[in-house]
Amino acid sequence: MGRQCAYLREGWLALTALLGAGLALPLAPSAWHGPEVAAILAVAAIALLAGQRWAIAVIVLAELLLVPTAAWRAALGPGWIPRLISIATIVAIVPGLRAMPHAAVALAGMLGEARTERMYRCAHLALIVIGVVAVVVPLL
């Protein structure tokens, strides 16, 4: 039962990542490289749907880097349609950001280090730092 729940959670994460990537592609003219990150997000979501667990870490990293583009467009977009698309993108990104602990486990496995609780905490902290830097750097 637990494994089936994990598969459903991963499937939901992959589908919302695909939705977020599709919604972020129209945000092409941006200061952050939105279309490139959205393309990486789409490829990682397809890899997760194919059963590649490492893609969880890539999805979370891509969504962390996509947050500034979507938030900037949601707050200061040129019209109502781009703002609504940006808000929908942010809503689609939320499940990926909530999967950060699972991404830390996958990231620790990708690094090839010993799978210890300390390594998981360090990977989780690294993901949080990347997210903070991704949000703060465009504001400078």
Image (cartoon, rainbow, N blue to C red):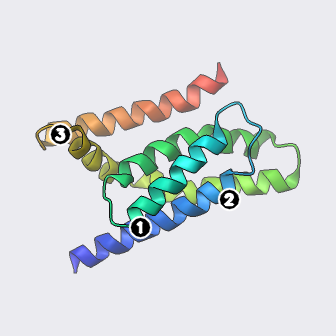
How many angstroms separate mark 2 from mark 3 (CA)?
Answer: 36 Å
Residue kind at label 1, given as amino acid type? Leu
The residue carrying pointer 2 sits among few (fewer than 14), some (14 to 19) or many (20 or more) residues within 10 Å by Cα, namely: some
Write down the residue under mark 1.
49
Residue kind at label 3, given as amino acid type? Gly
Write down the residue under mark 2.
88
- 140 horizontally vs 94: left or right: right
State the quadrant of the N terminus: bottom left
Between residue 49 and residue 93, name the one nearer to us: 49
Write down the residue under mark 3.
112
Q: Residue at x 74, y 43 (%)?
A: 28
Element marked by disc 3: loop
Circle 2/circle 3 CB separation < 8 Å: no
Residue 49 versus residue 77 in the image, above or below: below
The residue carrying pointer 1 sits among few (fewer than 14), some (14 to 19) or many (20 or more) residues within 10 Å by Cα, namely: some
Q: Position of residue 29 (x, y in %)?
A: 77, 38
How many angstroms separate mark 2 from mark 1 (CA)?
Answer: 22 Å
Q: Quadrant of residue 67?
A: top right
Residue 14 in view here: yes
The label on residue 131 is: none
- 25 horizontally vs 135: left or right: right
